[in-house]
Image (cartoon, grey):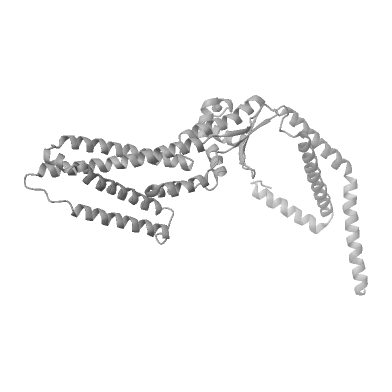
Amino acid sequence: MTDSDAIAAHEDDDEVSLLDLLQVVADNLRLLVVGSLLAGLVALGVCFAIAPTFTASTSFMPPPQQASGAASLLSSLGALGGLAGAASGLKNPSDQYVAFLKSRSVQDALIDRFDLIKRYDEKYRQYATKELERRVRVQAGKDGLITVDADDEDPQFAATLANSHVEELGKLLSRLAVTEAQQRRLFFEKQLAATKDKLVKAEQALRGSGVSASVLKSSPVAAVEGLAKLKAAIAAQEIKLASMRGYLAESAFEFKQAQTELAAMRSQMARLESADPPSSAGGQADSDYISKYREFKYFETLFELFSKQYEIARVDESREGAVIQVVDVAVAPELKSKPKKAIIAILATLAAGFALLIFVFARHALRNAAQDAEAAHKLAALRASFGRALGRRG
C-alpha cells in the first residue's frame, strides 16, 4: 500500500468516525430534545415557586472636598498653617464613603433598627450581617455618584433599606472628622480646651502672687507682653514644624525656612530674657509676679491664637459641610429583579442538553467497548478497582 492509499484510508476512517457520532446523535435525538426541554420546564416551574425579589436603588453625591479652599487657607494661617496641611490628604472621597457604608457601625445600626436577625431568620448577628452584605450592593460610579442597591421580597422594605443606608451614613459622619475643615476644627478644639485649662491655672497663680507699688510702676504689660507673645509664637512654630514632618521632607525649602524662622525667634527670645534686669534683694516678690504675669500672657496669647483658628475652622466646616446630597431617593419598585425566569429556563435547557449529549456518547462508547474482548477486560478491571475503593467485595 502506497503512502497516498494510507492517507486516503485514514481520511475515510475520520469520515466514518464523524458519521458515527452523527448517527449516535440521531439515534438519541428524542432523548436529547425531550430531556432538555423537560429540564427547562422544571427550572421554569421552580422559578415560579421561588418568591420574587425586588431591588430598590438610591444614589447620592458625597460631600465635595474643597482642596482649593484648603490650599488658600494654608497661606493665611501663618505660624499655624502646617496644621491644616497635615490634616488634609483625602485622595478618593467616593471610595471612602463606600467604605463607610460597608462599615460595621452602619451595618449594626441597620440590624438593630429593623431587627434584621429576626427578619432574616438568623441565629447570630454575624449571620445577619453576611445576609445584609449579600442583599445590599454599594458602588461608586465614574460620574462621582454613589449608588446603594437593596434586595428584598418586600418592595417597600427594599426602598426603606436603601434609603436608611444614606441616613445612617449621615449619622456616622456627624461624629467623624472627615473633611479637611472638620479635622482642623477638631484639632483646634482640643488645643483650645487644653490651653484654657492652663490659662485658668496661670491666672490663679497670678492672683496668688503679691502686687507691690514698685511692680506697678515698672509697668510689666509693656515689658512682659511682648516676650509672652514671642514665646507663644515660638510654640506655634514648633507645632507647625512637627506637623510639616508628616507631609514634607526635612530637605524641602518650606521646612528649612520654617526652621530658620524658629531659630530667629528663639534667638530674639534669648536676647530679651538676658536683657531683664536682675531683681534686688527685696524684689523677690516683684520677680515672682513678673514671671507669673509672663506665663499668664503666654497662655492668653496662645488661647487667642487657637480661638481664632478654631472659629475659622468652624466657619469653613459650616460652608464645606459633610452634607450628603441625595440625587435619587429609593422608591418601591414595581417589577421584580429576580429570579429571571426566561434566562434560567434557557440556561437549564442548554445545560441539560449538553449533559445528555455527553451521556449518550459515553453510553455508546461503553457499548462498543463491551463488544471488544480487550476493552471488556479493561472495563471489568476498572469496575473491580472502583468496587475496592468503595469497600465492596466480590
Relative to 237, say whether 158 is above or below. above
Front residue (pair 308, 9) = 308
User: Do we see residue 154 in this rendering?
Assistant: no
Point out residue 324 in the picture as x, y percentages from the top left corner. 56, 34
Residue farthest left in this picture:
281
Relative to 1, say whether 146 is above or below. above
Residue depicted at 62% across the width and 34% down the height: 135
Front residue (pair 386, 196) = 196
Image quadrant where residue 131 sits: top right
User: Do we see residue 122 in this rendering?
Assistant: yes
Residue depicted at 57% across the width and 29% down the height: 164
User: Seen in the image, is 62 located left or right of residue 359?
Assistant: left
Point out residue 293 in the picture as x, y percentages from the top left corner. 20, 41
Residue depicted at 70% across the width and 29% down the height: 52
User: Seen in the image, is 39 located left or right of residue 208?
Assistant: right
User: Seen in the image, is 262 located left or right of residue 23?
Assistant: left
User: Seen in the image, is 290 located left or right of residue 248?
Assistant: left
Front residue (pair 330, 282) = 282
Point out residue 231 in the picture as x, y percentages from the top left corner. 27, 48
Point out residue 238 in the picture as x, y percentages from the top left corner. 33, 51
Front residue (pair 388, 261) = 261
